[in-house]
Image: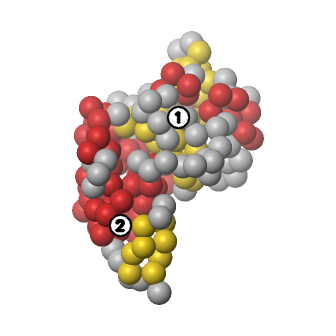
Amino acid sequence: MANTLQGESLPAGSSEEDLAARLLAPRTRERFVIRIAFDIRRLTPLYRALRPLAAALLLSALPTAGLAVEPASAVKLQNRNGSPFSLESLKGQVVVLDFWASWCIPCRTSFPFLDSLQEKYAPQGLRVVGLTLEDNEDAINAFLDAVLVRFPIVRDPTGHAGDVFNVVAMPTTFLLDREGRVAARF
């Protein structure tokens, strides 16, 4: 029995690499997505947990044909210094939006990976944004002093962004396509 995705028929049991090669080969400007998936796979201990992210990155290069939703325009965020930050300003880039909290142990382990992901693929248009719903500046600062990252950290102490994105646990990560629509949720 064949799996069908975006009009492509693949034999049952095809690997992600086979899927990526068949679906993305004609899209040379999106080939970096394949490299991201392979980098995720090299992190064997994290691979099983992050495998959905790799698949979503591959699929983000494909047209979403009405499957994605666009909540990014509905949230008002702030940089750590209090200045406004807009997810809409990142349109044209693939965005990994990571909801995190200072008390979240898995967030501490995922931040270094997300930081290296952005460092490696920023030239190809990948951005990582960390979003906290906390209003405790001391807790946020203590977390970020212990876990150094170079990607932008923004906040929404009102929690409205959590409601818009239906976040019920930390961490929760979203993949936003180049139009700012949610392509995947983890």
Residue 42 lies, with reference to residue 67, above or below; the image says below
Q: Is residue 45 visible?
A: no
**Considering depth in this image, is 122 or 29 the residue closer to the camera?**
29
- Seen at 38% across and 44% down, the residue is 114
- Seen at 52% across and 41% down, the residue is 176
**Considering depth in this image, is 100 or 17 the residue closer to the camera?**
17
Q: Which residue is mark 2?
A: 19
- Seen at 37% across and 37% down, the residue is 126
Residue neighbourhood size for the residue with mark 1, other residues' Cα within 10 Å, grouped as few (<14), some (14–19), many (≥20): some
Residue 168 position, x and y percent, is 70, 52
Residue 132 position, x and y percent, is 59, 35
| Residue type, numbered disc 2 | Leu
**Considering depth in this image, is 71 or 75 the residue closer to the camera?**
71
Sequence-first disc among 1 and 2: 2
Q: Is residue 70 left or right of residue 50?
A: right
| Residue type, numbered disc 1 | Glu
Residue 137 position, x and y percent, is 58, 25
Q: Is residue 173 left or right of residue 122?
A: right
